[in-house]
Image (cartoon, helix red, strand yellow):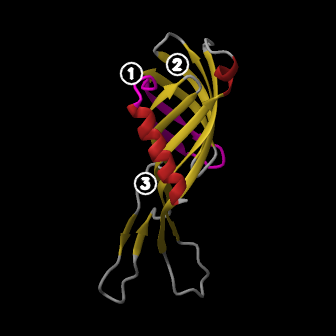
Amino acid sequence: MKKCILCLIFLNTYLFANSQFYNPYIQLDAGIPLDQKDAGMFCLEFGTSNKCLDLGIALDYESDSFFKEYNGEIYIFKDPNLHPLIQDGEFSYFENNSLQIVAKVDIIRLFFKESRHAFKVGGGYGIARYRDTWSSRNFTDASLAEYTLKSKSNFGFFGSLKASYTYSINPKFSIGAFIGGTNYLSAGILLRRKI
């Protein structure tokens, strides 16, 4: 795994140093995870391209807290005769952040070099953090618990796969759609601009 990351970094550095390859771009993806309710996904990618190959660095964020409003209040009293007061305390949310090195191949430009259409397939690998928080207050009468608040967080290396279609409106600007993602399969739109 470490050898693969080092090879990608070396290749990226070499291609950035080669002046014929240096065609920088910035790309913004926005979409929704297909198997998560009320969630959103944003990705910002900066890279370089030549002919049918893109290499870059991507920072993405997935969460279901974009479209939710939380208002939970819990009061725990020192007096043992007073029970905790919970007002609208049930909630849950997740968020996933990642920083990855990405590589994509344009299938259309392998065969048609001057096409305004692009269909890219690729993926990335990098560092990711996943955090999930939830609460519950549905217990039986025999239970000693009245309310729980739990949170878990994972940190490690994750990979991603993505396919996208873009159409060049002019030589500098493209618009398109994508499917793929780091933690959840997402679909959405993308904007790309050559710098």
Residue 57: give x, y in percent of width and height: 44, 41
Q: Which amino acid does label 1 sit on?
A: Ile
Q: Report the front residue among 87 and 195.
A: 195
Q: Give the range drawn in magenta.
A: 18-45
The residue beneath circle 3 is 70
Location of mark 1 (residue): 195
**The residue under label 2 is which amino acid type?**
Ser
Q: Mark 3, mark 1: which one is toward the viewer?
A: 1
Mark 2 nearby-residue class (10 Å; few <14, some 14–19, many ≥20): many
Q: Describe the element under mark 2 as helix, strand or loop.
A: strand
Q: Is tag 3's residue or tag 2's residue first in the polypeptide sequence?
A: 3
Above/below status of 39 relative to 3: above
For disc 3, the neighbor class at 10 Å (few under 14, some 14 to 19, many from 20) is few
Q: Who is closer to the viewer here, 128 or 12?
A: 12
x then y, percent, for residue 20: 44, 22
Residue lying at 45% horizontally and 46% vertically, measured from the top left: 9
Residue with the mark numbered 2: 174
Q: Is 171 located above or below residue 156 in the figure?
A: above
Look at discs 3 and 2 and give the one toward the viewer: 2
Quadrant for the N terminus in the image: bottom right
Q: Magenta stretch containing residue 118, yes or no? A: no
Q: How far apart are marks 3 and 2 (CA)?
A: 37 Å
Identify whether 124 is placed above or below 89: above
Farthest left residue in view = 78
- The answer for how far apart the CA atoms under marks 2 and 1 are is 12 Å
Q: Which residue is drawn at 47% across and 31% down?
A: 28
Sequence-first disc among 2 and 1:
2
Q: What quarter of the picture does the C terminus occupy?
A: top left
- The crowd level at tag 1 (other Cα within 10 Å; few <14, some 14-19, many 20+) is few
Image side of residue 50 versus residue 85, left or right: right
Label 3 to label 1: alpha-carbon separation? 40 Å
Looking at numbered disc 3 in the image, what kind of residue is underneath it? Answer: Tyr
